[in-house]
Image (spheres, rainbow, N blue to C red):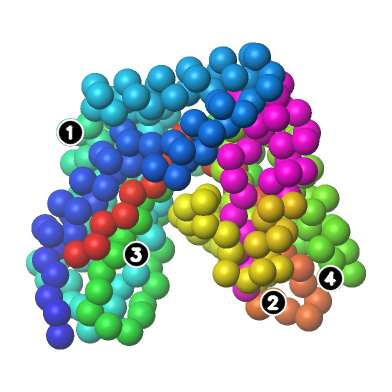
Amino acid sequence: MRYISHDHISQAVKIAVIKANILLPDDILAALQLAAENESNSRGRMFLNILLENAAIAKKEKMALCQDTGMVSAHIELGQEVKIVGGSLEGAVNTGVKAGYEEGFFRKSIVKDPFIRINTSDNTPAIIHTRIEEGKHFRITVLPKGAGSENMGQLTMLKPSQGIEGVKDFILQVVKTAGANACPPLVVGVGIGGNLDQAAYLGKQALMRPINILHESPEIAALEEEMLLRINALGIGPQGMGGSTTALGININTFPTHIACLPVAVVLGCHCTRRASIEL
């Protein structure tokens, strides 16, 4: 049995949320740089260079990449031989989020109730997903996701007969509907299969995978490559101002499903899709 303290976890979460809000992930930064080099539309290229400048300033000044520092979802891989001592896992995560948002001077955006919209004043509670696995490891990935891109996500329950072409059409429809509102260039996360709630979770999980790593299945990897080309052919471009860079990448996750179901969720990440992982 391995013991990890509540305080150790909360400190790790604090570090992770600060890092995620300030530093653009390496794979996304590299994709932005490549896009700026290859973008043929002058306005699109100008906006890409502005986004790169923004990332450089955020890193240098230790400031948030975006004023919307989001709602934190925490994805935890917990070895079943790990015991948390000194408090609960949920309490540790929320303590870390609170401390990170205070120390980083990040905007607090969470309200206590969907209808009685009083701010919690510390950006908690976080949304916590925990996967129990074999072993003694503890890994946490935080995704602080802003409302601009989150509001543009969609989920549908297709008929199985609609098949892969129905999935492709839905992905394109979601990106078209989002237009400039999701703050492109986008990172597109797609969840296919499971049930209604699992599809949404798969789509959010897809944003955790670096966009320079294709799916392990050759068929799904080919679908990712095809859909990235088709999304960028829409011409929405950086910040919706036109160009060939509407998305930096698309990651697709799948899961077994019912014989009568074909759930599909499209979760959009903005140009600064933020994530950070820490292992204890």
For the question of whether residue 167 can be seen, the reply is yes
Q: Quadrant of the N terminus?
A: bottom left
- The residue sitting at the right extreme is 161
Residue ID for mark 1: 103
Query: Which residue is found at the position 72% from the left and 64% from the top?
Result: 263
Query: Residue 257 bears which disc, if any?
Result: 2
CB of mark 4 within 8 Å of CB of mark 1?
Answer: no
The amino acid type, in three-letter code, at marker 3 is Ile
Secondary element at image label 1: helix
Query: Residue 189 bears which disc, if any?
Result: none
Pointer 3 or 1: first along the chain: 3
Query: Which residue is found at the position 28% from the left and 78% from the top?
Result: 79
Query: Which residue is found at the position 32% from the left and 21% from the top?
Result: 57
The amino acid type, in three-letter code, at marker 4 is Pro
Pointer 2 or 4: first along the chain: 4
For the question of whether residue 116 can be seen, the reply is no
Secondary element at image label 2: strand
Residue ID for mark 3: 76
Secondary element at image label 3: strand
Pointer 4 or 1: first along the chain: 1
Pointer 4 or 3: first along the chain: 3
Mark 1, other Cα within 10 Å: few <14 / some 14–19 / many ≥20:
few
> Can you say whether 239 is above or below 267 in the image?
above
Cα distance between the residues tagged 4 and 1: 49 Å
Q: Nearer the viewer, residue 18 or 32?
A: 32
Q: Nearer the viewer, residue 78 or 62?
A: 62
Query: Residue 160 bears which disc, if any?
Result: 4
